[in-house]
């Protein structure tokens, strides 16, 4: 694996995939494809099944029906570890390990992959520049970081081994509006720069539209509409789509 | 950064084990091992054999106060000890089946030979069971003989636990005389004198050579129906000694016929009532100088501390090596986990005294069976806390580790165990502190430690001696607590402490 950014990405697809937790249908049988190198946003209220999509794609959950395809091949349990190393995953509050410094968090996977200390340090500094994180912050523990810094470190951790895809689950959900706005700009730049497959989960329509051309709106475990922001606004397929768009428009920070 | 192969708490376990092995070992190249029961006369007779052996230039040790008859007998049969003082009545009534109660020593010798056990002739006195009452009380009620008790069904009896159970004890006595008393309680023999003196009970069992009989103004009731058999004092020894240590066997034989009842009662009185060491009394009797091995408080304290720390460290170290993996397994496999925790929980409910005694048929007496018992007690807190620490990790952290693409083993070592570290260490600390306390019972099966002076102190009614064991045990418990707090500070990742402060 090289430290240079490799273009391309991974093609993901759900094929008639459904997932239940007990009696609750987290996801009805759904087929969705994410082409390599594209950026998509999954939107919807909480409980709509959007996080479940990401968890299925990473093999953190397995569908009760149908299957997941990665680069056109059905995902097997034995493929999961190599797949996860090709994918960066960021969750709402970062999921940083509190017992390790920021650098320790970044180093976990690279060290397992056999990188030496210089290479880890070099890559960390490169990513710190990309995410506008002061290098000195890397020596701190998660408890000593601000919310924005923590999310930046989480993003860096996801990018350390130069993955082919980034899956982000409400990456900015826990941040205050100012920091959030700043990071939205940075993330957008990073996505455009890296040219990887990116799937962002958010409940914020404005944020989704800022990141991605393609928006997938989910409700109660089913896809309601799959299209551009303009499709959702001007050609809603369902009354709920309009309600969702309306509700978002009233947010004071909506563009 | 260092890559450690074992999680830190398990390394700690290995360190404890290694450390314990550096402590002075108690058993070396096969000295003759003399045992004694948990009462003064037996200890004095043990000391007499020891002093005689040393006088004859034989390397010998005395494992004092190992417990009751069954423990000593089994220890002798299994070769854990080589000799101990016994009484003929106990042999005919308890230990040998189908021997007439009045069997002579020649008969006993013939019966013991197939067991590989030898017996000396009588040491010169008989320490028979008797029933004693306060002299003034007995005079008031007009009681002289045991059959006089028939007229007083309301009298309260306090009998030693051994006397309550054994065939030649209370059940047989009641049958022989038809005694009607129902208020009968079990007491420790050394406490029963005070119970009868204070009027808490009216009659007790006693041994005819007990020093307390004149001291507490007791009357021994005449056994008018000749119920109690003779209890001639003898030494039992392993016949194998006649090959490896014939000199020791002749030391034992030389002691026969040399101690009469009065001499024994006087020796008992010097130890029990005047607080003279058993070794000094034994040496005086033999007309030699007391051995230097009873060298005062500090060397004793040092030796007991070494024994106690060794018991705790080895049992705890072994427990960590097993309990941490068990806890990990329990956290991984829920169903199995419930079984593991349930099973270790059951072990915890076994009364500690019983646990130590259970170990004797399996492992004999001494350090290792005590370590085995303490080991079993240490499992539960460590297993449970390891399990709780792992299960309690926030699901998003567990999932973040999985999503990174780290294999399960690496996740466990780098993420899950460090996050569970505090809980695991707390479990180890609990086990260690409990162990320090429970290890005082190890003296009952000859493992020494701080329990030894406590046992002797109870036997001699010597509070000072009890404190010589109880205070260091309490101090050690505090030290262990403090030590583990340091270890906790050292092993808990800084980031977790910062997090806890927020």
Image (cartoon, coloured by chain):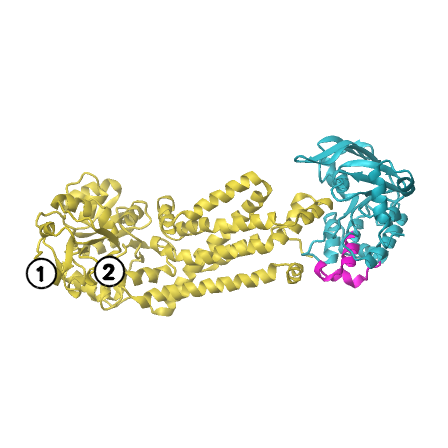
Chain colours: A cyan, B yellow
Q: CA distance from mark 2 to mark 1?
A: 34 Å
**Residue at screen point 36% across, 46% down:** B358
**B27 is higher (above) or lower (below) than A41:** below
Query: Which comes before the other along the chain, label 2 or label 1?
Result: 2
Residue B406 against residue B45 in the figure, above or below: above
| Quarter of the image that includes the N terminus of chain B | bottom right
Give the number of marks. Answer: 2
In the image, B203: left or right of B453?
Answer: left
Instruction: Tell me the residue that label 2 is attached to.
Output: B44
Q: Position of residue A208 (x, y in %)?
A: 85, 46
Find residue B224 and name its label. Answer: none
Residue B434 visible to the viewer: yes
- Quadrant where the C terminus of chain B sits is bottom right
The magenta stretch spans which residues?
A132-154
Instruction: Residue B190: say if magenta.
Output: no
- Residue B236 seen in render: no
The answer for which chain carries disc 1 is: B
Q: Which of the 4 quarters of the picture holds residue A139?
A: bottom right
| Res B139 label | 1
Dot 2 falls on which chain? B
Which residue shows up at 37% across the image and 64% down it? B469
Circle 2 sits in a helix, a strand or a loop, which is it? helix
Indicate which label's residue lies in the foreground, 2 or 1.
1
Q: Up-down: is B118 above or below A12?
A: below
Which residue: 38% across, 67% down? B299
Q: Percent from the top left, x then y, of residue B282?
A: 23, 63
Magenta span includes A146? yes
Residue A23 lies left or right of residue B148; in this view the side is right
Percent from the top left, x then y, of residue A123? Answer: 81, 54
Q: Which percent across, then down, holds residue B190?
A: 25, 59
Q: Residues within 10 Å of mark 1 (few under 14, many from 20)?
A: few
Co-location on one chain, circles 2 and 1 = yes
């Amino acid at each position: 694996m090289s430290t240079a950014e490799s273009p391309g990405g991974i093609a993901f697809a759900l094929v008639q995939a459904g997932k239940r937790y007990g009696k609750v249908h987290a996801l009805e049988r759904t087929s969705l494809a994410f082409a390599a190198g594209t950026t998509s946003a999954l939107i919807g209220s909480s409980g709509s099944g959007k996080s479940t999509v990401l968890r299925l794609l990473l093999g953190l959950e397995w569908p009760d029906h149908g299957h997941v395809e990665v680069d056109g091949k059905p995902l097997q349990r034995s493929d999961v570890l190599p797949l996860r190393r090709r994918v960066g995953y960021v969750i709402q509050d970062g999921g940083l390990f509190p017992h390790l410094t920021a650098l320790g968090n970044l180093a976990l996977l690279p060290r397992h992959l056999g990188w030496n200390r210089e290479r880890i340090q070099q890559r960390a500094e490169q990513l710190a520049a990309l995410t506008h994180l002061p290098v000195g912050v890397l020596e701190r523990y998660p408890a000593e970081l601000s919310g924005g810094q923590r999310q930046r470190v989480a993003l860096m951790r996801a990018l350390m081994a130069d993955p082919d895809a980034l899956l982000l689950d409400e990456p900015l959900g826990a941040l205050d509006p100012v920091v959030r706005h700043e990071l939205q700009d940075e993330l957008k730049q990073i996505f455009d720069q890296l040219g990887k497959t990116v799937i962002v989960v958010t409940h914020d329509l404005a944020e989704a539209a800022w990141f991605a051309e393609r928006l997938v709106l989910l409700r109660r475990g089913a896809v309601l509409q799959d299209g551009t922001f303009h499709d959702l606004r001007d050609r809603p397929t369902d009354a709920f789509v309009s309600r969702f768009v309306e509700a978002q428009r009233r947010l004071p920070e909506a563009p | 950064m260092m890559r450690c192969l074992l999680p830190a708490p398990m390394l700690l376990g290995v360190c404890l084990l290694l450390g314990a092995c550096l402590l002075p070992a108690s058993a070396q190249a096969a000295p003759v091992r003399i045992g004694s029961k948990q009462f003064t006369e037996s200890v004095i007779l043990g000391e007499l054999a020891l002093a005689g052996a040393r006088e004859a230039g034989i390397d010998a040790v005395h494992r004092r106060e190992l417990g009751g008859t069954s423990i000593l007998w089994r220890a002798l049969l299994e070769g854990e000890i080589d000799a101990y003082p016994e009484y003929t009545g106990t042999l005919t009534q308890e230990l040998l089946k189908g021997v007439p109660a009045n069997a002579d020593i020649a008969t006993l010798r013939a019966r013991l030979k197939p067991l590989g056990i030898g017996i000396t002739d009588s040491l010169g006195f008989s320490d028979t069971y008797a029933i004693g009452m306060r002299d003034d009380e007995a005079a008031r009620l007009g009681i002289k003989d045991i059959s006089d008790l028939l007229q007083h069904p309301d009298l309260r009896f306090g009998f030693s636990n051994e006397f309550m159970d054994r065939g030649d004890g209370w059940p047989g006595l009641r049958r022989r005389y038809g005694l009607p008393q129902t208020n009968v309680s079990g007491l420790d023999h050394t406490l029963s004198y005070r119970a009868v003196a204070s009027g808490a009970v009216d009659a007790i069992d006693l041994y005819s050579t007990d020093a307390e009989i004149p001291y507490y103004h007791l009357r021994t009731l005449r056994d008018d129906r000749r119920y109690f058999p003779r209890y001639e004092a003898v030494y039992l020894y392993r016949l194998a000694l006649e090959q490896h240590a014939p000199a020791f066997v002749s030391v034992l034989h030389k002691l026969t016929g040399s101690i009469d009842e009065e001499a024994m009662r006087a020796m008992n009185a010097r130890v029990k009532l005047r607080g003279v060491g058993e070794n000094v009394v034994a040496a005086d009797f033999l007309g030699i100088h007391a051995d230097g091995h009873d060298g005062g408080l500090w060397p004793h304290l040092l030796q007991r501390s070494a024994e106690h720390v060794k018991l705790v460290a080895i049992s705890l170290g072994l427990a960590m090596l097993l309990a941490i993996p068990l806890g990990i397994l329990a956290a991984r496999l829920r169903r199995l986990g419930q079984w593991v925790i349930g099973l270790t929980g059951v072990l915890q409910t076994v009364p500690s005294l019983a646990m130590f005694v259970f170990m004797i048929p399996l492992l004999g007496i001494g350090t290792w069976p005590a370590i085995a018992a303490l080991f079993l007690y240490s499992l539960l807190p460590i297993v449970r806390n390891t399990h709780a620490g792992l299960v309690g990790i926030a699901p998003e952290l567990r999932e973040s580790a999985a999503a990174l693409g780290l294999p399960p083993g690496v996740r466990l070592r780098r993420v899950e165990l460090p996050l569970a570290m505090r809980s695991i260490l707390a479990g180890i600390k609990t086990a260690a502190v409990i162990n320090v306390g429970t290890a005082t019972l190890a003296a009952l099966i000859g493992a020494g430690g701080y329990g030894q002076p406590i046992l002797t102190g109870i036997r001699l009614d010597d509070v000072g001696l009890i404190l010589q064991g109880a205070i260091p045990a309490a101090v050690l418990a505090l030290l262990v607590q403090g030590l583990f707090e340091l270890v906790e500070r050292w092993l808990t990742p800084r980031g977790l402490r910062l997090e806890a402060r927020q």
